[in-house]
Image (cartoon, rainbow, N blue to C red):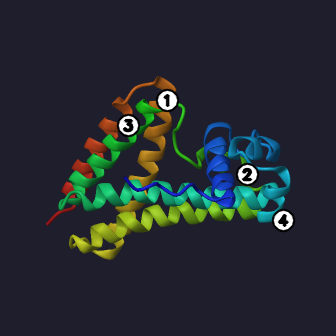
Amino acid sequence: MANTPQPGTRERIVRAASLLMQRQGYEGTGIKQVAQEAEATLGSVYHFFPGGKQAVGVAAVQHADQEFADLLSASLSGEADPAKAIAACARALARHLRDSEWVDGCPISATALETTGRVPAIEEAVAQAFQHWRDMVADTLREAGFPQDDAHDLATTVISTLEGAELTAQVFKSETPLTVAGEHLARLIDSYKG
């Protein structure tokens, strides 16, 4: 059996910061806590991130962006029909949230709300993440034959709806908001088919 390589110090720092920010937000996450969770020294954090907390925060948001993009990609490529793919994505998000005992919602929403208008570098990283996810959905819809404008508008609706449904599911500790949102998004997408 092959050994799985252990993540390097920088990667451990980014993963720890990403998870902590997902659960506590940017303001509630301190560099010392990140170092402790990553099993790294404070000096290591500043070695890899001389820009301090803000630089760690940007890297954490970028990591969260890629983690969600991977889940989204798996859902979108798992179904030929984009409507079914979006419903599958909503179910996957619901399972992930339930399996985390309702603590691991959207990896960037708390950080987004806390930093908007106050921490431009993080705000930009968050905006890029949302745009990345929207573009992934729009590309899938375009590949399925949807016109460019419809694909963009539907993708914006999909990401915005999933964000709200995930927060609601987390608050109520129920998969229902996500599964219902997924079903209705699928019907909306189906209504655009020719």
Which circle, 2 or 3, is nearer the viewer?
Answer: 3
Mark 4, other Cα within 10 Å: few <14 / some 14–19 / many ≥20: few
Q: Residue at x 76, y 62 (%)?
A: 55
Q: Which residue is drawn at 82% across and 63% down?
A: 47
Q: Which amino acid does label 1 sit on?
A: Trp
Whole-angstrom CA distance, mark 3 to mark 1, is 9 Å
- The residue that disc 2 covers is 115
Please determine whether, in this image, residue 190 is positioned above or below residue 23: below
Q: State which quarter of the image contains the C terminus.
A: bottom left
Which circle, 2 or 1, is nearer the viewer?
Answer: 1
Tell me residue 4's x, y (percent).
47, 55
- The residue that disc 1 covers is 102
- Sequence-first disc among 2 and 3: 3
Whole-angstrom CA distance, mark 4 to mark 3, is 37 Å
- Sequence-first disc among 4 and 3: 4
Q: Residue at x 74, y 45 (%)?
A: 34
Tell me residue 133's x, y (percent).
45, 61
> Can you name the residue that lies furthest to the front here?
1
- The residue that disc 3 covers is 94
Q: Residue at x 71, y 54 (%)?
A: 116
Q: In which quarter of the image is residue 92?
A: top left
Which circle, 4 or 2, is nearer the viewer?
Answer: 4
Question: Is residue 191 among what the camera can see?
Answer: yes
Q: Nearer the viewer, residue 111 or 190?
A: 111
Q: In this view, does 162 lie to the left or right of 183?
A: right
Whole-angstrom CA distance, mark 2 to mark 3, is 26 Å
